Amino acid sequence: MKILFINPPGNLELEYGELRDAGALYPSLGLACIAAIGLEEGHQVQVIDAEADQLDMAAVMSRIDAYSPDIVGLQAFCTTQARVTELARRTKELSPQIKTVIGGVQLTLFKEQFMNDPVYDFGVYGEGDEVFRALLRQLVGEQKLAEVPGLIWRRDGTVITNPPQRLIKDLDSLPMPALHLFPLDKYHSSSQLRGRKTLHIMTSRGCPYRCVYCSSNLIFGKTHRFFSAERVIREIHHMIDHYGADGIQFYDEVFTMNRKRVMALCQALIDDGCPVPWTCFTRVNLVDREMLEKMAEAGCYQIFYGLESGVQRLLDLVQKDITLEQTRVAIAETRRAGIESVASFMLTIPTETAEESEQTIQFGLDVDPDYVYWLTCTPYPGTGLHQLALQDGRILENDFTRYNVFNEVVYLPAGRTLEEIQATLKKAYKRFYMRPRYIVRRLKGLHKLPPWKLWNLIKSGLRMFY
């Protein structure tokens, strides 16, 4: 069969707003993993990334018509749902025989909402790799669709949701993401990351934490499963040898979840010669001095921490399960190890007062990471945070395409005004980045960035300040 995966039209303005020049554009690892399953099963597979190639809907439809696929695979998030559904509708209008398959977090959260729309033939919910493999085998075989766990389908017009697929225990059994199907010359990492071509890798899946603003455990479960060190190193070398990567961003939700595993992986990277520098995402309660020193020795130069708030009451409200003291220690130890820290804070959490926003800004100044993102609270549908937002204040924006924009205010806590929050956001950026001491410190390290990335940081900063 001929399979076509599509990332719908979009642009960095929709995702980053005034920070668009500093933002990242990566190939979808989700689509790349599922595309690899199609190839492993012996099918013809192509990918259209309309955002990377800057294609409008008409151009995408022209490519679909030229390829004439049997299956079109789509991935939906709340921010892309409208565009994905329009794409599926146009695909069906072009050729009703094309089977449309929808996956992603939004489908998993709102199964009926999607599958009641006849533009979708099949839904793949949860961890989709083996679900898609089983679906392909049924479509070329006896089509016993009821035997495919994790599949949503129709029988005589009635939507049927099969029992969930078990999570994959042996992640090494999966093929490497089929990134060669993507226009790799069109992507770039965030502007604070070194290297001209940093690509991303998932070395693990799952997160057992319960943060109310996140829905990832619905896809990968409240477990933490990881690829072997050998597989990770093999994938890094594949990135270097085949795609020209000169940096790696480990895209795990919580890279340091399993301390023993992280120490072993870092030692394997050291033994291998640390071919490229790398970064990761983790939590402040899951690092310590010995681990950070080992990570630095293994090539880690930057860690992203979600700090969320400088008010313990609000951290407890969003069930972050960290303390302010853990944050202070983690940022200090990260700097001591010679690793840069990037921190994000959510201003305007439900029930947050103007005084508490000020406390969070001051806390960010006190812990003093190398880079900071001040974001307004975005209550994504299907999350516990969305329920909290409905109970306190009001949601201003129901156009979910605006929910990824860094400087977009989509929610107001009770007693706050739009103008005050917008002013608070700009004040936070100015107060952090315009400090003379901070500027002097950053100038010492900015030479490590490619000139075009440095320029993009400056442009984004000027937009946020003024």
Image (spheres, grey):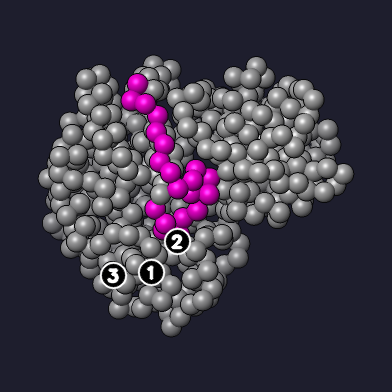
Q: Position of residue 303 (x, y in %)?
A: 27, 44
In this view, 302 is above or below 390: above
Q: Nearer the viewer, mark 3 or mark 2?
A: 2
Q: Is residue 114 left or right of residue 331?
A: right
Residue 411 circle label: none
| Label 3 to label 2: alpha-carbon separation | 16 Å
Residue 311 circle label: 3
Magenta region, residue range: 209-230
Tell me whether circle 1 and circle 2 mark residues in contact (CB < 8 Å).
yes
Residue tagged 2: 212
Q: Nearer the viewer, mark 3 or mark 1?
A: 1
Q: Position of residue 100 (x, y in %)?
A: 73, 37
Which amino acid does the dot numbered 2 rest on? Val
In this view, 126 is above or below 408: above
Specify which label sits upstream in the sequence, 1 or 2. Answer: 2
Task: Tell me the quarter of the image containing the C terminus.
Answer: bottom left
Q: Quadrant of residue 327?
A: bottom left
Of residues 321 and 360, the one drawn nearer to the viewer in this rendering: 321
